[in-house]
Image (cartoon, rainbow, N blue to C red):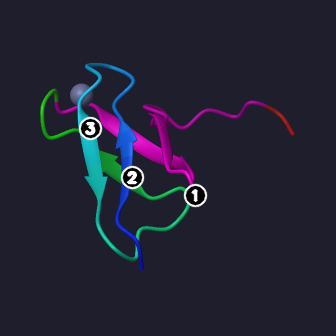
Amino acid sequence: MPVHTAECPECAATLTLPAGTVLNELISCKDCGTELEVVALNPAQVDYAPEVEEDWGE
Ligand SMILES: [Zn+2]
């Protein structure tokens, strides 16, 4: 499996996603500590993880 990398939206650090990373997995940026969620693979993309559980409807 290829190693995925994604860019932190907070500090632009390059994050290496471990092999076996799955969609919606939560990771933390090693540089700024921001909680991130894997929102896409191939290519990998991360976005801010939801901080609080809220009902957005739907
Ligand atoms: Zn970061």
Give the CA distance from mark 2 to mark 1: 17 Å
Range of magenta residues = 33-56
Question: Which residue does the numbered mark 2 point to in the structure image?
Answer: 26
Task: Find numbered disc 2 in the image and state the secondary structure of the residue it sits on.
Answer: strand
Judge whether residue 54 is colored magenta: yes
Disc marking residue 57:
none
Question: Which residue does the numbered mark 1 point to in the structure image?
Answer: 42
Q: Amino acid at mark 2?
A: Leu
Residue beneath the point at 16% across and 26% down? 32
Is the C-beta separation of discs 1 and 3 under 8 Å?
no
Quarter-of-image position of residue 3: bottom left
Residue beneath the point at 12% across and 32% down? 31
Image quarter (top left, top right, bottom left or bottom right) of the C terminus: top right
Q: Which mark is first along the chain, 3 or 2?
A: 3
Q: Position of residue 42 (x, y in %)?
A: 57, 58
51 vs 23, left or right, is left
